[in-house]
Structure formats: structure tokens, C-alpha cells
Amino acid sequence: MKNTIWLAAAVLLGGCFDSSDNNSANKSADAAQQTPSTTAQTVQPAEANLTYGTLIDISHDTSSNPVAYIPPQCYTDPVSDNGAHNPCYVCHTNSKRPNFLNDTDVQTTYTFPEPGVDNYWRNAFKDRRTEVSQISDEEILKYVREDNYQTDSGDIILAQKLAQPPKQWDRNDNGQWDGYVPDVYFNFDDEGFDTAPDGSLTGWRVFAYYPFPGTFMPTNGSTDDVMIRLPAAFRQNRKGEFDKEIYKLNLAIAESIAREKDVPFGPVDETQLGVDLNKDGVLSISSVIRYEWAPLQDRHMYYVGLAGELQKAGEVKAAARLLPVGTEFAHTVRYLDVTAEGTRMAKRMKEFRYGKKSFWQNYHQLRTIVDKEIKERHDFPERTKQVTGNAEQGLTVAHGWTYQGFIEDDAGQLRPQNYEETYFCAGCHGGMGASNDTIVSLERKFDHGTFRDGWYHWFDKDLSGVADPKREDGQGEYAFYLQNNPTGNEYRNNYEVLNKFFNADMTPKAEAFAQLQQDISVLLMPSAQRALELNKAYKVLVKEQTFAQGRDAILAPLPHMHEQVELDSDTGIEEILSYY
């Protein structure tokens, strides 16, 4: 039986949002008028760089797009004159437990729910070249180099706004913001820990990782970064006191469990911790977190400090490829900056995305989620992905994670996403075979032995000189992606990548691939001209505030997009590939 796609790849929590309820395709025209309802309002800022754009009303839990969690990439026609490309495999693949989705059928078949036959991503068909041409290079560079996240004094702009939220953002009308308030200061020490203005650690730790192939490669329009934070108990010793070394150790243990691999660490004295980290059977000096998890053979892994005591008491749970309840991720999406040294991450944010593991789901429960979705897809093909929550508190998916997002407003600062814009996030965190506990970034973290063991921000070091990572079959990951997607994206419109790596007859350029083997930035970072054009195209989108119709930086109508698909029809892809 085919697995259901339901591309809930960004988060997945079961719930009550369903196309037969308040977002049916039959009501899309009305919802399109209601969902993004706005009220123009001028607010006197407390500081010169605290400004408001058009205020978006987030009180309506409706969506004009009943399948907003299925991203526009999935409506691409993969067939070209040179045969079928296959960008689908990086998301939809034979998965690893406890992700039981195994959604390889999506590579060969348009496995959508019935409301998904129409392509609602209308921005893919717009031509913005005239508007883009009216923005000068100097103007866009000045714009992307401005900080739209923090004030001149270092305070977080959005946090100040959410302290007294405008009425349009106060969904339950209780006078306060009940969702996540951004609290990352992007002031990282040489171990990647974020520091607040008062000198205290916020708990956030930034890490470097291999960008996910496709849209998330900077050559396709955006740079991004990721931070992780474990709950307070993981940052404390057994006395309940903050201990940075304990926290570093618990982060290493969490990484080992989530990635199923040994993590060098130390040396540390196991006798002081009461945990056999290297699994040698005695408490001694250890220099590695040894991965070993086989509960049926009574082989477990334990956290240290207060979290370890809570784990022994049954209050903290651990299992292979799963993170502890309360784990948080912060993820910013940014513009591209063009400097004398090359294309880099810009200061200005497009989005601030946030996820938190709200509750635990064991292996049996995670398998049941997939079994239920397969049955519902068969018995009720009109049903769409179900989530719970709202725009103020975030949307929760069945796997136990809650996701929330903030996006750039037409004044250039961040605002809360409305329901539909957040529903979009339920397409990549758990609803695809390639995710790990609904997350893809941690599994792609740079390993021990790299710069700062991978705990650093891109502002400290960019992607230059990073070698192409190896797949499990020994091939370079990005080289393999290019072999199956010569334009380096799903839309087949990145001709800069195509021309850099392939000849006119589509034979690979050996020199370019040899360079890629040693330096992935040759693929991932766009030229100055392309970076500027993509920045301008996105700025036009920000002015429109039409994110519900797509949030990609697109200059001209995409030539290989379906406006409509036939349910369960062939995509044209014949060979199923593996992400791993």
C-alpha cells in the first residue's frame, strides 16, 4: 500500500484542522478574503528602529489553501527534454525508525489528498522583472545589511512589540502574547553559546550544518541558521545549579542519541557524574559519548546532572533518534549579502522560525500516526493534514512538536505569521521520510574535528572550504543531487548552477565537480548578480505580503509548474532514489 505523502515536513501534530472543516476548497474564495485581513495602523515606536507595518489580523484560524502544507516544489513537472529529474528523493525516501513514513511512492506518483489537485501557489506564475528592475543594487544592499531583529541598543525588536501586542495579534483578546517570544541575542561565544546583554547564557547554542539540498541551498535565494536549546534541567547539575559543562555534555549526549553515533567529548570524570559515558563497564575517565541503545537488551543511554536524575525517576525519556521533551529549535531565514570576499549571509531576516517538542511519542505511537494517515488517505481522500493550535500559540503536529513563525512585514520588521502562513510549516517537519524527530538540521550538523566541533554561527565562518559530505553509498551528497537535478533546485530554473556544472550537451564539467568535492560553496553560494536579483524579488514579495501564495524569491513565472495535477498520476520519475 502506498504511504500517504501529506507533506507535513516542518512539524506534525495530530489535531482538528481538516479540509472538511473550516478550510475546504469550496470556501477558498471567501477564506482568501478573510484570512489575511489587515488594518493599516501607525504606531509611535519607543525607539527609532521599532516600527510597524500593516498589521495582519491573526485571529482567524482559516486557510484559503486547504493544502498549504504541500509546498510549491511538489507541483513541479520533473520531466525535461533530457529525461526526468528527481528532486523528490531528498524529502521522500525510505525512512529510518522511528520515522515510519517510507514515502518513496511520492517520487513516482502525485499522491495528494483531493483538495490538492489545484496549485494554490500563484506567486509561482507572477512576473516581477519590471518591479525588480526598479530597485538599484545600492538600495537592496543597504536594505539587507540593516538589522531588523535588534534595536541599536541590542534589544530584540519583536520581543518589545510582543510585550504589548497590537490588538490584531492578540488572538484570544486577553491583552498579552501567549506564544513564543524570540529570545536569541545572536551574541555567541567561541563555543556557540548565546549571551544576553546582562552576560547570562540564554541556553541557545548555534551549530553549523550542511544545508539541505534544493530550496534551502543559498544559491536558490536564502541563507539560514539554526540554534538548539535543551530544557533547564539539562543545564543544571544534580543540585539544580546552572553548570555549563553539564549542559555541553548533555548536548553531546542528545546529539549522540539523535544521530546514533559516537560523539568525542572530554575528557570527563565519570565518577563525578555517575554515568558510564564510554560504555566500558566502569566509571573512569572518558573521552567519548559511546552510542549504545538497545533497551530490550537492557542497554540504555543516560543524561547527566539533574536531567539524569529525572531520567532515572522516569520523568525524562530517551530513545534512539528522538530528542527530549522541551527541546527547542530557533531557525532564521535571511537575505544574501554581497561583499568583496563573495556572497555571504545578510544581517536582515526574512523569517524567524521556532519549534518546541511539546510531548513524548514512543515508537508504537509514532508508527500508529503513519498507519492512521494511510488508512485515512484510503478511506477519506478529501481529508487534509490535521494540526492543532492557532497563530498565537503555534500549531502542533501528531509527533509532539509545536511550530511557530514570524515573517517580514511591509515595513521590513518581523510580525507573527497568520494561521495559513504557519500551516505552511507543517510540510517539512515530520511529514517526510527524510526527517528525524520532525527535524533535519541536527542530523546534518558538522562533526567533531571541524571548526569548533561544529558549534558556531555562519558569521564566524562561512561554507568556504567545506568538503562535499558522503552519502551512505560513498558518493558526495551534493554531487549526487546535481547528477539528478542539474539546475540545483526543484524548479529547474537555476541556470547559473546548470551552466557552472554542465556543458551544453549535459555532460558534467569534471573540473567543477572536482572543486565541489573539496568546497561546497562553489555550488551553494550564488554569484553577486544572482544574489542581488533574488534579494530584490523577495523584497517585492515583502511589499505585497502575499506569502500565502508562495514565499520563494521568483523573478519570472516558473516554466515547469503544474497549475493542476491529476490525483495518483505518474510524475514521470521512474527510478526511486534514497536520501541516505
Image (tube, rainbow, N blue to C red):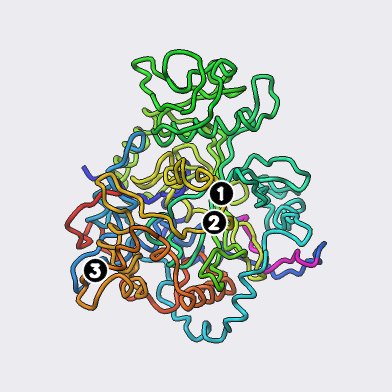
Visible residue check, residue 167: no
Q: Secondary structure at mark 2?
A: loop
Asked whether disc 1 touches disc 2, contact meaning CB atoms under 8 Å apart, the reply is yes
Q: In the figure, is residue 362 to the left or right of 100?
A: right
Residue 243, compared with residue 377, is above or below; it is above
Residue 376 relative to residue 534: left or right: left
Element assignment for label 3: loop
Q: Disc 3 versus disc 1: distance between alpha carbons?
A: 34 Å
| Residue 461 numbered tag | 2
Percent across and percent down for residue 375 are: 29, 40
In the rendered structure, which amino acid carries the disc numbered 3? Pro
Corner quadrant of residue 554 = bottom left
Instruction: Read off the residue under disc 1.
Output: 456
Q: Nearer the viewer, residue 445 or 121?
A: 445
- Name above or below for residue 520 compared with residue 541: above
Of labels 3 and 2, earlier in sequence is: 2
Task: Give neighbour class at mark 3: few <14, some 14-19, many 20+ (Cα, 10 Å).
Answer: some
The residue at 32%/62% (across/down) is: 117
Q: Is residue 81 left or right of residue 251?
A: left
Choose between 190 and 369: the one closer to the eye. Answer: 190
Q: Mark on residue 508?
A: 3
Q: Which residues are drawn in magenta?
A: 48-59
